[in-house]
Image: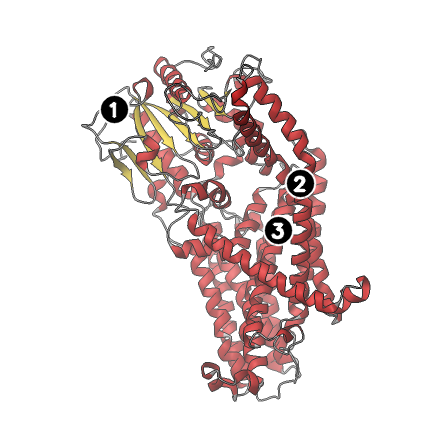
Amino acid sequence: MADTPQPRGGPSATGDVIELRVHGVSGASARQILDRPHTHQVAGDRSGGFHRPRPGYPDTRGAGGVVLEAYRWSDLPSGTAVRTLSLVFLLPFMLCNVALWMRPASHGTGAAVVKALCRTLALTLTALYVLSIVGVALDQVAWKCMSLPSCLSGRSWMSWLGGRPAGLRLAVLALVPAAAVGLVWWLGAGRRWDFPAFQGPTTISGTHQLSAVGQWDAAPPVQRLREIHVAAALATLDLSLLAARAGGGASASTVVLGVATAAVLTTCVALVCAHPVIDQPKRFATLDRATRVLRTVACALTALVLVAVAADPAPWPSGNGLPGYAVLVTWLFVAQTVLLVALWAVVLRQRRGLRGGTKLRGLGAPVLGAVATGVAVAFSAELVYRVGDLLDRGTPTVHRSPIGPPLAYKWAIVVFFLAVLAALVFAAVVVLVSRPGRRRAAEATVARDFPDAPPEAAPRLRQVEKTIARARFTERLELLAVVYALLAGLGLASSTVGLLELYPADVIERWTGVPAALVNFGTATGSYVIAALVLALVVAGIFAYRTAEFRRYVGVLWDLGTFWPRVAHPFAPRCYAERAVPELTRRICHLTSRGDGVLLTGHSHGSVLLAATVLQLPPGVGDRVALLTYGSPLRRLYARLFPAYVDDEVLREVGRRVGWRWLNLWRDTDPIGSWIFSGHRPGRPPTVASPAGAVDRRLRDPWDVVVPPSDTVAPPVVGHWPGESDPRFDDAVRELAERLRRGSPPGSGQEGTQRPR
């Protein structure tokens, strides 16, 4: 570490213990994290920086005399309005990318098949993105609206092209989806950091997959996947134009270009399935050149298709929609349905060998894959449906309008609306059915915690019981996700009815007796529901990074999704762990190289970053490191959702790396964090053997239910909020700092038992 620069704040005294705090999704300022009014930055930059209390002021050290330091990373996953919007509109890509990380813990053929299926599904989402823009620009505007004088009336911005030949109109407006491909390409590439500057020393991570986080995203595989997806996107545009051109009779040039387009698409599918080749971690000149050539060929092929479509003198077929477009959309839905069914089949087969965990453990890949596909279809259908409504000037005839969307999209909107209603009804049932059990468990917890509460504390006790009961509902979210995924998959399959030229209103009225007018009303309502969902996601994305209370609930979803590297979809939002984990590793190595001990304290998602960081520390560094986690979702969320990457063995390896100098503080009122190894209560033996059994310490929350003499209100319920001001937090810091100073070995008995408060 001789080449490591000294911090701008100057080196601390040799032999100090540095308490390095890493915040969670609440994303507070450095002053709030350190609970000190005067701070200054000692390393990093505005996006991710290390801060300390400013010297010269009193109270610059923490409990046990530790030197306080904070790592603030909240601006890495957040930032500008462009990034916020990208998180919303690239949401299906992000969900599909996370789905691959949710695969069951298996190796060999099963894991390879899951990765191939997820990556192929991700490729279909890119194609769907392009087809939705094609539906607006080519089908609705160039083909339908510009052929109708009533649609062109009063629209000078498009009437200049209205009287032109169909081929020229299509070629000109095909530049819109081509530009959309360039936009999503740019958003996927995002801002580049000087990644080598954040790399720590060479790590020994063994077989623990969590250690891959922070070392994968900037590697060559992402660039290769990006080239493949760009080629597939452009080939989808070419296929749409060539299918329309072939509707009036295929010429020799159309056939040649069609064969070349099919070859590009086939190559793209083959490459994403050949992940041992694509996932080469280092630069491989031949492979990198091949993916660049594939993208260049796709760009050149698109230019040739545009020229051929614009210059072909053959007459175009007459029809109410762009020839071949509705068929392409429907068959894409068929392909996605087949991929989801295959993914379910493979994962269910792999789950036979799983031991422990919940009944739904390991189903994350097909569940989130179905949700990602459903959201993508809903977004695409809403875009085409809403533009058709605007072009038709908002008349209620859009359901049968010549400018309306293809039947597959209409079916998608109807089924999406029905799936949302069914999921809401099921959620209400789950809430009602599970409430008695959750309330009984909460009442038992409160009775144990406050056995001597006075009668006047009864309202406060009921409030605490409700908080604990709501926190326990987190375990039921898995079932809700599975139900919605099944409904979304069935809806996607039903969209293929559009191939039979059957309208939703006609089919539903014939088989259920529901009036067609009511079905059309439901279709319009479903469209508005999707629009409201998009608007809500935009608002949530903005406020999640500007309002601490809002980010507490919404930000966890964004941060969880962008924590994982882009192994499935290269257009997903950038992985912030790519910088945060190597940067933390580098900082810890620098501090320990000076003889300092480092006490890592991580709240909420910060504990996940620290777990990944500990697994990347070089040999010997962990001897001077201790770990304090609180509000940690490692067991409750990550071990459930990502069993192949976070399991009991990985968590035990984290403990071994730090010599079992690890304490985890948890509360029953926390809906996100929980125990990691043993959920035992104070005074009861751990459920696992030491030293892992001594890691978890439950904190009673609130610490009392009566108003103390020095206050006017009862102590607050902390829940998932950070608790650095809690005296029990200070006790844990003192204990771990003392163990670092003494260099206590594993199993030395320093784990102790929690002192009651």
The secondary structure type at the circle numbered 1 is loop
Q: Amino acid at mark 2?
A: Leu
Q: What residue is at 42 percent from the left and 44 percent from the top?
A: 576
The secondary structure type at the circle numbered 2 is helix
Q: How many marks are shown on the rendered structure?
A: 3
Nearest-to-viewer mark from 3 and 1: 1
User: Taking 84 as reference, is 680 left or right?
Assistant: right
Who comes first in sequence, dot 3 or dot 2? 3
Q: Quadrant of residue 389?
A: bottom right
Residue 335 shows in this picture: yes
Name the residue nearer the viewer: 735 or 93: 735
x and y, in percent, of residue 619 in the image: 41, 26
x and y, in percent, of residue 752 in the image: 47, 12
Q: Which residue is mark 1?
A: 59
Structural distance between the alpha carbons of marks 2 and 1: 49 Å
Q: Are marks 2 and 1 in contact (CB under 8 Å)?
A: no
Who comes first in sequence, dot 3 or dot 1? 1
Residue reaching furthest front?
456
Q: Amino acid at mark 3?
A: Val
Name the residue nearer the viewer: 162 or 234: 162
x and y, in percent, of residue 577 in the image: 43, 41
The label on residue 339 is none
Q: Which residue is mark 2?
A: 479
Residue reaching furthest top?
749
Q: What residue is at 45 percent from the left and 15 percent from the top?
A: 757
Structural distance between the alpha carbons of marks 3 and 2: 13 Å
Q: Are marks 3 and 1 in contact (CB under 8 Å)?
A: no
Task: Tell me the quadrant of the picture where the N terminus can be found.
Answer: top left
Who comes first in sequence, dot 2 or dot 1? 1
The label on residue 371 is 3
User: Taking 168 as reference, is 110 left or right?
Assistant: right
The secondary structure type at the circle numbered 3 is helix
